[in-house]
Every structure is written in structure tokens, then in C-alpha cells.
Amino acid sequence: MIIRIFTACGGGGDACLMKPKIPQQIISLSILFAVFISALFVARGFLVPKSFGKYGHYRADAADEVAAQPIQYAGYHACTECHSDIDEIKRLSNHKGLSCEVCHGAAAKHIEAPDEFIPTAPRERGYCPVCHGYNPSRPTGFPQILATQHNPGKPCMSCHDPHSPVTPRTPEDCSACHREIASEKSVSPHVTLACVRCHAVPQEHLMNPRLALPEKPASREFCGQCHAENADSPKEIPRIDLASHGDRYLCWDCHYPHYPEAR
Amino acid sequence: MNDDNSMNRREFIISCSKALPFTAGFLLFPINATEMLLAQESGGYDPTQHDFAMGIDIHKCIGCARCADACKKENNVPLEPTFFRTWVERYIITTDGETRVDSPNGGIDGYPEISGNMEILRTFFVPKLCNHCANPPCVQVCPVGATFVTRDGVVLVDEKYCVGCRYCIQACPYGARYLHPEKMVADKCTFCYHRITKGLLPACVEVCPTQARIFGEVGLRSSPLRRFLRFNDIVVLKPSLNTKPKVYYAGTDGEVR
Amino acid sequence: MLTLITNLGPDFHDIAGYIYPNEYELHWGLLIVLYPYLTGLVAGAFILASLERVFNVKALKPVYRLSLLSALAFLFVAPMPLLAHLGHPERSFEMFLTPHTKSAMAMFGFVYAWYLMVVLLLEIWFDYRKDIVTWARNKKGTMKYVYKVLSLGATDISDGSVRFDDKIGKIITIIGIPSAFLLHGYVGFIFGSIKANPWWSSVLMPIVFLFSAIVSGIALILLLYIITTMFRWKEVSMTCLNKLAELLIYAMIVDLSLELLDFIQRLYESEESIEILSQMISSRLFISLIISQIILGSVLPMLSLIWARFGRLPDEMRRMAYFIAAILVQVGIFSTRWNVVIGGQLFSKSLRGLTVYKTELFGLEGILMVGFLLILPFIILFVLTRLFPPWADSESRAHVSKA
């Protein structure tokens, strides 16, 4: 076990030409470390996964494993293959952007085995308000109702066909979708003004609200039609000097037109 | 009497009859109809031809959180309210300069009524998810290479390799990652990688009723994302951290973190 | 904040403001607080040993070998909290097989292996080799064979060989100093390089970690020296103790200055995160930061050390003051680790909310486990001191200077 490298001459004299002796410590330690490190490399050869490093510092098979996950939602088009009659109606309605599976749940199983797995349909009143219940954080103009006040107890489906959800009466005015604005206007001095007095609304707006936007007044003179000093309008309407009032700002930069006197 | 021909004809008939059980098998056994509907042949997907990204239009989001709900169902995310791959936040900015944010159960069960005596200046919803950054800090810090960016620009986690050290969860500035309580590995939004590689949309994009989420590809002219990026003023989250996120927000507010 | 978790589901009442939904669970808990504390003690004890070996601070001779053995004992325990914390500890070897060179954490396996094998074990072996060989020759029974194996076949204890040991030992110590810095500094870098977290992201983080490590290491050796000498019914060398106290004072001054600098700079720059961080310090971290880390753990021990070292006191009082100060320092440094690790997760990355960390009593991340991991190094040290007695005045020190 003890390794010695012998010198040219036996036991020590300085006069001898001695080959430098590698100390025992270094030899023992070098052997130990060599064994250890080579064991590490051997282990590495066995243990590193085969596809590692192919495309980067990761196991290339992992991407394929993630991609092999089972699918739960079949997707919009999957339903229209068989249920084309419903789709024809829905495609032209206000719910055209609504995927079937939002209400009927994940349906990939139904595609594979149509008779065994039947998607449900939410009929309780609690479901439609998930989108249509009043929430001030929703974008303005999105049709919302106060669920507790809007025909309480009645299922939504009894008046609104979910695949073509028009209201029982064609909305005579804008308040069906713009309820907030309508309710503010109704307690303001502008209560007698119809929405269309100031906003020209294209017919298409009812079907494609965002793509066919109503017009808005563009100049101070518009409000001046009623509010200018010399306007031809009822005497109770407050007048201002159009030339000097409010510098060059537009009227609605300071006055909220749907409730003009609010501070 | 051409021996070759007759042999060929016989061979042909024999080979046809060999094929018969296979074709019969195909007709008899049900195939995944979803896959049939797609024009993709299996194995035909080339990740180097794609670079996925997402756009979110805040003006359109109604906060219904059907996206968060569908994501949990599609990806088997644990149902507890502390694990989300995507969630919807509600911001309420009041006239006194305060900003209140909440996301109860990711928004899936709706939001509580706004209480208190303040006047609301602005309020909106912001859907959040993994941003699949082009310079992801989470990938940088993984000690073993268990999370990575695929060649099609999606950041994924290798659940067989992850050791669960949670360094990536700490490194994500957006809170997009969580530790899966059963698998004990890091988990997060995968852009529904199993769907997009088959030509489908991610579940959250699929179910969004107002099309507030737009899924598409960077650098592809025909992608719907291209028009979105062109027509809107785009903002990404925490740009100062230089993570180069690939979820682009339009109509968002400076108060969004 | 001790509550027995019964896992009935998340309790959102303790959340103030808004946190991202995924942030409810704190990911790096007590075990990750423990790990830098342990490696800090290793690094600190080693730096102390190197002061004697390389910089010839003669007064520290009585504690030289004790420091090395303590460093080894704590180093053995250091990876245990990490393994216990991993989601899949059985896969931990992946860090050796496929380390991601961009990640600071990937270097853990290599730095640890390097420090354990090339620095600490080798240095101890070279320092003790002559004794090991002598014990192998003189002892009886199983111990004889234990020492024989430990000598690794290098049984030459001639003068030249011993001089060689000494030379190599010095070289290893010189290499060991930056290695010790790396062993503990990389942990600071792990935290300091996370840009997503404004409490952690700081250039000073590795440096503060290192200096608090040195402080805790010196305090540990001070404690161990007093305790072990007491148990052996011997006299402590007041020169050594005074030197230790002096070094501790200097290290604490630097450490405190660094932390003060960080604090002042943060307040001055007043970046976006200052509001939520101030809220966090004044509410969630008040006890562990203001009371435990600053007052009890830094100011009080430093003042008492200065008074004990430079004031006119009888030796018994001096020893008592050192002892108490050293214990307070340990509490202070542990609180420092707590405040860094837990503090960084108590506020949301949305900068709008705060959460709570509820420690458990049982379980892998529980207080009992941490207590066990804190006691274990002392048990290991006890075994090591039996195997390799480090006492300069011990009868069992078999080697004679002239062979």
C-alpha cells in the first residue's frame, strides 16, 4: 500500500544525484481524486438524459411531452360540423364571438364520443350575469343588467335565446347597453335630450358596436346651438359667451355632457 | 401470357388484401375527431417556423374570467385560489389618487361590489399570465435546465427534470409561476402548447367572449397579432427589467404592475 | 407568529393590500433561512483559521484547529436544509450532471464539493497527518484501523515530510480564503441578482452576506472556545479570547456600516418600492429587524464587546460579557438571514400588498426540524473532537515535535 519512488542511491547522502521524489501524500491524494472524478464522468455518461442539449440546455423530449397533453376544449369550429343549424343563427347574432364551450363546457370528450358525454347547458339565472351582471369596471357600452332587479326569478332563457340574444323588445333607446350613461342623464338637466340629438348612430352599431361607432360632436359651436348667447333655444337654457368662455378647450373637457353640472 | 404482368396483378391483389384489415381497422376504430378536423398531419409540426406571442386588449376585457376558468379545466390546474396560470385583476383608481387592485380567486367567482365612499376615476380589468419573455429571468436562473424556451418562443417547464428549488418562481417578476402542490415541480402557463402545436388556440383565447385576447405569431404578416400590434399603442409589463415580454397590452394604464 | 397549520385552506385575512394570486405561498422558508446561516458559519470559522495560518495572528493558535473542525461540522450539515427543501431531492444530482452555467445556484454542487474536499478536508488532513500516523501506530483496536485508513497510506512523518505538509497546508489555506468567499458569497449573489425583487436586488448583497458570515463565524468560535474549555476543566487563554473579541468588533463595525449604507441609500433614492418596503419593515418585520437584528443583535453586543474588551474588568466578567455578546450576535445574524429571505417574500411583486409567513412546528420546514439541524453540527463536532482532538493542551495530542 505504500508507494515509494526510489532514488538512484540508497539512504540519503547529499552528494548523490537524487531524482526528485513525489511525496506519498501527493500520490495517495492524486489516486483518490482520480478515482472520484472518473467515477463522476462515468456516472454522467449513464445518468444524463439522452435528448439533453439537443436544442439548448434542456431535455429536448420535454417539449414533445408537454405537447402530448390531452385536449379538453374542442374549439369553436369543432361544434359547427354537427350543429351547423345553431351556428347559422348564432353567427349572425350578438353572441357571434362567444365560443360554444364557454356556456356548454369543455367538449373534446363529446367530439370523441357524442352519445356518451353530453355537454350541459347552464339554465340557472346565475350564469348569464357572469358576463352581463352590472359591474362598473366593465367597458362602457357592454350590455349589462342589474340581476336582482331585471325580472327577478325568471330564467334568462325565457326571454332571450342564448344563441341569438335579442331583447324581447327592440331597444328603443340606447339605455339597454349604455345604462350608466342613461341613468346619469336621466337625473341631469339634459334629461330631455335624446341620445341621437348629439350622437349620429349608424344602423350597423346595433350589430357591430365597436366597428360602427356613433359620431360625437366635434366643435364648441355644437353646444353653442343651445348654449350660445344668441342661440335660438328655450330661455331656461344657461347661456355663455362662446368666444371667451373656457379659452380654447372643447366644452366636454370640463363639462360632462351626460351630467353637465356635476362638480 | 405475360408472366410478369400476371404476377404483378396477383401481387397487387395480395398487397391490397393485406391493406384491407388496416383500412377496416381505421374505419372501425374511432379517431380523435378534433384532430381530424385540422389540416395538420401528425409529425408535420415544425417549431422553427413559428414564434408565438399574445395580445390583450384592455378596452375589451369584461372581467368575466372565463379564461381563467377554462385554463384551469384545460390544464388540470389545482383548484385552490392560490394556483393560477392566468388570472384577471380588477383595478379601481379613485379621484383621491388611490389605486385598489383585487383578484379574488383569479376573478373566476366574480368580484365583490365596490364599497366605500370614494369616487371612481377609472376602473378596468387586466388579464395576467406568463409573458413568455424573450429574455426570461426564470430560464436564466434554473440550475438544472428544467425550464427553457422552445424553438417556437414558448417558455416551458420539464416536469420530469425540475428539482423544485423554486428559484424560477422567485425570479419571475410577474408572479406567473407556482409550485404544483402534488407534482412538487414548478408550473405555469404554457400558451396551451399542446393545442397551439396542433393549430388550435390556447383555451383562454378560445373562450374569451369579447376577443380581448389575441393569439398569434411575431414576424408573421398574416397573423391577427400583427394588426393588433400595428393599430394599438402597445405596453408591456415592467419593461425596465428588460425581460422582453411577449404579451402585449393595448389600452392599459400606467397603474398596472 | 407561531401557528400550527391544520391545512384547512388558505387564510386570506392576513393579507394587506393586493398580492399576485400565486404569491400566497411563501416559497423559501425556514430551511432557506438556515442554509446561509450555516454556510456563513463555515466561511467565518475558516476565515478565522486562515488568520492564524496565513497572517500569523499568533494569539489565535488555541482555536486554530477548533475553527477548522467547526467549519467541517457545519459544512457537513449545510446541504441538508437544501435537500429537505427541494420538491424532488432525489433529482438533486442533476445539478452535477447538467448544471446550467447561467444560474448562480448551479454552482452550488461544485463550490460545495470543491470547498469540502479540496479546501477543508485536505487542510485538516495535512494539518493532522502527523498526528493521524502517530495515533495509527500507538492506538489499539478498531481506532487503530480507523486512523490507518485515514492516513491514506502516506505514513512518512519525517521532518521533511512534515515541513511539506506545512507548506501545502499554507497554500491550501491561501486558496481557501477566496473559496470561502465564494461558498458564502454565491448565496448572496443568488439573492442579489434577482431583479424581480427590490428587497434582494442589490450589488451589496454578496458583500453584506459575507461580512455577516465573518461576524457569526468569529462569534461561534468564541462561544465554542469558552464552552469546550469549560467542559474540559481547563483555563481559557485570555489573549486568545481578547483577540477574538477584537476581531469580532472590527468585523461588526464593517458589517454594520455596510447595512447602514444600504439603508441610507435606499431611503435617499426613494425608488418605487420604498413605500411597500417601509410598510413591511414597520409592520411585518418590526420585531425581527428593529428589535432582533439591530438592537439585540448588533448594537447591544457591539457596545458590550467594546466595553468588555477595552474597559477595565476582571477576567471572569470579561468572559461573561463576551459569552453573552457572542450569543446575541448569533441571534442577530440569524435574524439577518430571516429578514433577507423571509422579508423578500412578505411583500408582493406588484408592490401593492403584504402577506404573512406562518411557520410550522412539525414537518420538513418546521421549527423542530430546524432546531434539529442546528443541533446536529454540534453533535458532529463532538464526534470530530473525539476523533481529531484539537486541544493544544491535551494529553491525547500524541505527536512530539521532534520525531
Image: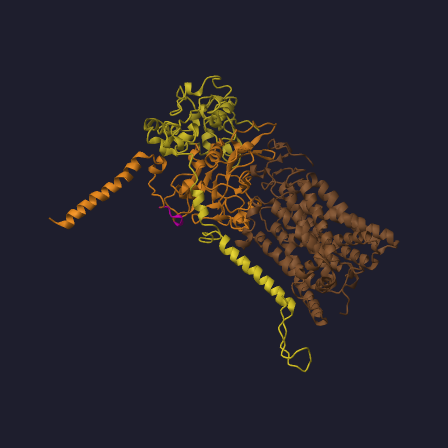
Chain colours: A yellow, B orange, C brown
Nearest the eye: B21 or C324: B21
How many tags in the picture?
A: 0
Q: Residue C349: in sight, yes or no?
A: yes
For residue B129, above or below residue A128: below
Q: Which residues are magenta?
A: B44-48
For residue C130, above or below residue A133: below
State the image coordinates of residue C60 (x, y, percent, origin top left).
78, 60
State the image coordinates of residue C318 (x, y, percent, origin top left).
85, 53
Q: Is residue B47 magenta?
A: yes
Nearest the eye: A137 or A183: A137
Quadrant of image for the N terminus of chain C: top right
Residue plotted at (33% across, 41% down):
B39
Quadrant of image for the C terminus of chain C: bottom right
Q: Is residue C322 shown left or right of residue A95?
A: right
State the image coordinates of residue C43 (x, y, percent, origin top left).
68, 55
Nearest the eye: C197 or C124: C124
Report the predominant secondary structure element of the magenta stretch.
loop
Place residue C109 in its image quadrant.
Answer: bottom right
Q: Residue B153: in sight, yes or no?
A: no
Residue furthest toward the bottom?
A15
Nearest the eye: A78 or B233: A78
Q: Is residue C117 magenta?
A: no
State the image coordinates of residue A44 (x, y, percent, origin top left).
51, 55
Q: Is residue C241 shown left or right of residue C31?
A: right
Place residue B81 in its image quadrant.
Answer: top right
Residue furthest toward the left?
B1
